[in-house]
Amino acid sequence: MTPVTAAPFLLHMPHSAEDKRRAITRLRRIQGQAQALERAVEAGTDCAPILQQLAALRGAVHGLMADLLDSHVREVLAETPAPSPQSIEETLALLRSYLK
């Protein structure tokens, strides 16, 4: 059953050409936000708009991270036979780094 919160194209790590294209498109959008932020800082823009852009950038990065983490956890849990202890430890390390 597909959860409502997961991005439909990231139900697994982006291995297919379409999944990779969508992930790259999202990363390019994030890159564009970062470049706009850099230009705003260079131009001496007031703090409020810069903070707003930073919040939007953070949200975009966190959204991508959450979707990839969701798909990774689903992939690990779906391993047959059961996930290896090493795979579980690697996934827990990812979760810990995400939650910092």
Image (tube, helix red, strand yellow):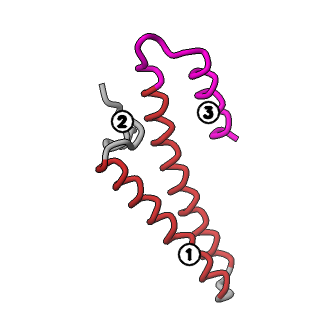
Please tell me how crowded label 1 is: few (under 14), some (14-19), or many (20+) other residues with Cα within 10 Å.
few
User: Measured from the top left, where is residue 20 in percent x and y?
Assistant: 37, 50
Instruction: Report x, y in % for residue 66.
Output: 51, 42
Q: Toward which corner of the image does residue 5 lie, by quadrant?
A: top left
Q: 89 left or right of 19?
A: right
Q: Nearer the viewer, residue 1 or 71?
A: 71
Disc 2: which residue: 11
Left or right of 16? Residue 80 is right
Report x, y in % for residue 23: 40, 53
Rounded to the nearest whole Å, what is the CA distance between mark 2 and mark 3? 17 Å
Asked if residue 94 is positioned above or below residue 36 in the image, the reply reads above
SS class of the residue under badge 1? helix
Name which residue type carries label 2.
Answer: Leu
Residue at left offset 64%, top offset 89%: 43
Q: Which mark is residue 80?
A: none
State the CA–CA distance, disc 3 to disc 1: 28 Å
Quadrant location of the N terminus in the rendered image = top left
**Above or below 73: residue 46:** below
Question: Which region shows up in magenta?
Answer: 76-100
Residue at figure coordinates x 64%, y 75% from the top left: 48
x, y (%) of residue 69?
Answer: 51, 37
Which residue in the structure is indicated by mark 3? 95
Tell me, for residue 35, which label it has, or none.
Answer: 1
- Amino acid carrying label 1: it is Gln
Badge 2 element: loop
Query: Is residue 86 on the magenta stretch?
Result: yes
Left or right of 7 in this view: 40: right
